[in-house]
Amino acid sequence: MTAGERVAVRTRALTKEFRGFRAVDSVDLAVREGSVHALVGPNGAGKTTLFNLLTGFVAPTSGTITVFDQDVTGRPPEQVARCGVARSFQITSLFETLTSREHVELALQGHTRDGFRFWRSEKLLGRNRARVDDLLAQVGLLPLADKPVGLLAYGQKRALELSLVLAVDPPVMLLDEPTAGMGIEDVDRTIELVRRIAVGRTVVLVDHNMHVVGSLADRVTVLQQGRILAEGTYDEVRNDERVITAYLGEAEHA
Amino acid sequence: MTQSVVTEAPATEADVPSTGSDPRVRWVLLAVGLVAALALPWFVYPPVAMDIVALALFAIALDILLGFTGLLSFGHAAFWGSSAYVTGLIATHYGAPFPVAVLAGAVFAMILALPIGYLSVRRSGIYFAMVTLAFAQMVYFIAYQWSGLTGGENGLQGVPRTFFGIDLVETESFYFYYAALPIILLGMWGAWRIVHSPFGRVLMAIRDNSQRARALGYEVEKYKVIAFVLSAGLTGLAGGVFAINHGFVALTELHWSTSGEVVLMTVLGGIGTLWGGILGAFLTVMLADYLASSGFQGIDLVTGSVFVLVVLLFRRGVWGTVRHRYLARRLRRATRRGAADTRE
Ligand SMILES: Nc1ncnc2c1ncn2[C@@H]1O[C@H](COP(=O)(O)OP(=O)(O)O)[C@@H](O)[C@H]1O
Ligand SMILES: [Mg+2]
């Protein structure tokens, strides 16, 4: 995977305070176009908050965010999504009464104006059947396509989260713990899937599984208490003294 | 936790969704509903029959917001009542055939709904309900004050029933019912079309998880405003027909209690089902009519108690519960069949 020279996502002095508590503290991050950039750090380090800032779900206290040099600071989530940034959620976030197929159809429709057509049949949503089937097959959900997601198992919902991001087909993907709670085989499958979809795209990845980070990331940023502790390749970071004491050591000895 | 991506989760009754009924069942229901609508004035005093179907459309229009978008409007009397007034005024002052007057009323309701919707949808839950209620109260007081136009407390009297010079329709409630029914059915079809459109799918997504809908790029507020305006338009059709049916518009049509009643009807029948609104309106009107004709005094007390009972016993409403049981059974069968398939 080769990373280009352009920066896909950049933050400058990005800070988020929750009632005086700095969840994200003066973060300067540059994610190069085409790279897989992992964010790691202990629980509560601010990774999810950083994702929420990058996608407009949380407004920064100070600092700026640019996506391909376009300032998106303070924009609402739907506008950031339309700038080509799609995310998955750490805590599975789905439409409980809809089926997997209906989810993917919605995701495909998200960047068109078709959603406003209240006078058309919902069959309009189903016209990309081959593409929908393909997306569901990629994450192994095709056999369960017409089951409401409220009835799916946890790992299946995680897989659907991923397929929704895939459906949007964005230049920039933010994946928040895509393998959390998955079994070994599913983790390996997900790694393969992310590797495949990362070609030609920029991926920002949060994962606690160092096997996942090690096999996918071109670059790793370690966060601790809202601040960047270290940054570099996986091997550089892994051998960094501060990181070993702060995070990897803790994880390996835990 | 080690589970494969394709492990089956157990199907429990509590999780059965609100989507995916059998198309054959849908056609049968539609046929039964149509026959019932056509037969109604043979069994029920025709003006009461007209009230039932008009209120049914009102409840269905509310359900687009309540059941499909997850927005509890407590101000729909504003659209029902203002359309009733506009319909009545146009029929009175211009002698317009009633379908034209009703259409004008509905258009007025939509125009009114645009700013109200725009200012309300930024709030959610109980705050949304309160903002819509506040706006509806404003409309009520305007109508109350502007008595030169609306008749104030006395209501708008003597609304004519003009229908292209066809005498029977204009004088006989029985024939008027059949002349006005197409407007109501058209409105119901419109609601069905909206719910089962790409737009309707987005509404359900917003209802289930509006943040996720945003992350997919949907402009949630815009969708909510459009849903609000469409709902107001259908409400307006119903309110206009109601006004012509009575030949009179009372100020109570704009009162908050009217907003409350339609919420009760919709919940009683079962939200997010469309059919529930029809059933809720039918049951409420029939019960009130029966109690009134037997000279009973505390109608509101009885209908209120029935409502509380139904909601406690069947939290999905009458229709919602029937439908849920049916879907749960279908799902259990399908799951059993699916399990058998994977074993082979
Ligand atoms: N909405 C919020 N309100 C208050 N505190 C929050 C909020 N969101 C996150 N936090 C706090 O910010 C810190 C970082 O959380 P989070 O970004 O979820 O960490 P991570 O994803 O790295 O585990 C935690 O201490 C958390 O309690
Ligand atoms: Mg997190």
Image: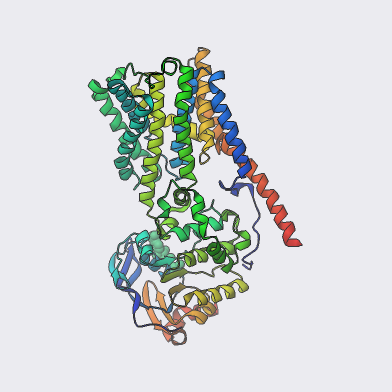
Where residue A189 sits, quadrant-wise, is bottom right
Residue at 40% x, 33% y is B235
Question: Whole-percent x and y of residue A166?
Answer: 49, 67
User: In the rendered image, which quarter contains the C terminus of chain A?
Assistant: bottom right
User: Residue B275: in sight, yes or no?
Assistant: yes
**Nearer to the camera, B272 or B40:** B40
Residue at 30% x, 24% y is B89
Question: Whole-percent x and y of residue A155?
Answer: 58, 64
How many numbered marks are there? Answer: 0
Left or right, residue A61 beside residue B202:
left
Question: Whole-percent x and y of residue B287?
Answer: 53, 22
**Nearer to the camera, A83 or B137:** A83
**Nearer to the camera, A216 or A43:** A216
Q: Residue furthest top?
A: B295
Q: Residue furthest right?
A: B344
Quadrant location of ligand 1? bottom left
Question: Whole-percent x and y of residue B232?
Answer: 38, 37
**Nearer to the camera, B297 or B169:** B169
Colour mode?
Answer: rainbow
Location of residue B162 with respect to B214 vertically, above or below: above
User: Residue B313: in sight, yes or no?
Assistant: no
Where residue B110 sits, quadrant-wise, is top left
Residue at 33% x, 35% y is B107
Location of residue A146 with respect to B100 vertically, above or below: below
